[in-house]
Amino acid sequence: MPGDEARREAQRWITHARRDWRDASLLKQAGSESDSLFWIVQQAVEKYIKAILIREGIVFRRIHDLEKLTDLLPAGHELHNHRCRLELLSIRAMQSRYPGEYDDAKPEELEDAFATGGFVMELMQQEFPAETS
């Protein structure tokens, strides 16, 4: 994908990441303790990672595994230092999709997921400043 086209496509992914993050933030502000927060936060993070991959011209499969997607990021990207946090978010997001098979989320797990999402959204704002202002 040529440069300008890749930047436009990455911007579309960033727009969707911001929407997902806004939705997660609204649910949290409303006091939600729903496991669905894991999924929404994970989706915001996933879309940010995919925006970077698109912008960089890196081909990726349609997967939701944040750890595997992070492995595709350019060497030295900050998210490589947070693979454990991203892996936990992926696991809890997957578990939230299968009620009854896993324990319900504990409030501190939701807080951790939200903290991870917040950290990643701050990175996104630094990396895509024109698109996130």
Image (cartoon, rainbow, N blue to C red):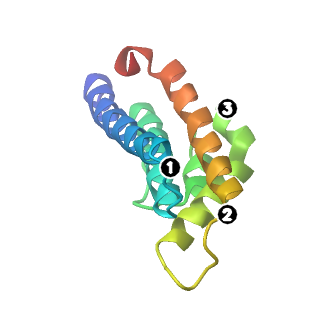
Instruction: Say the numbered circle drawn on residue 7.
Output: none
Residue that carries the numbered disc 3 in the rendered image: 78
- Between the C-alphas of marks 1 and 3, the distance is 31 Å
Q: Position of residue 39 (x, y in %)?
A: 47, 59
Front-most of 37 and 129? 37
Task: Check disc 2 and give the amino acid type.
Answer: Lys
- Write down the residue under mark 1: 31
Direction from residue 58 to residue 77 in the image, left or right: right
Residue 23 image point, x, y percent = 37, 44
Position of residue 33 relative to residue 51, above or below, is below
Residue 91 x, y percent position in the rendering: 61, 66
Task: Please say whether residue 74 is visible from this viewpoint.
Answer: no
Q: Nearer the viewer, residue 65 or 118?
A: 118
**Label 1 to label 2: alpha-carbon separation:** 14 Å
Question: Residue sitting at 64 percent across and 41 percent down?
Answer: 115
Q: Which amino acid type corresponds to the residue marked 3 in the rendered image? A: Glu
In this view, the residue in front, 123 or 108, is: 108
Residue bearing the label numbered 2? 106
Q: Splitting the image into 4 quarters, where does residue 74 fall?
A: top right
- Percent from the top left, x then y, of residue 103? 64, 77
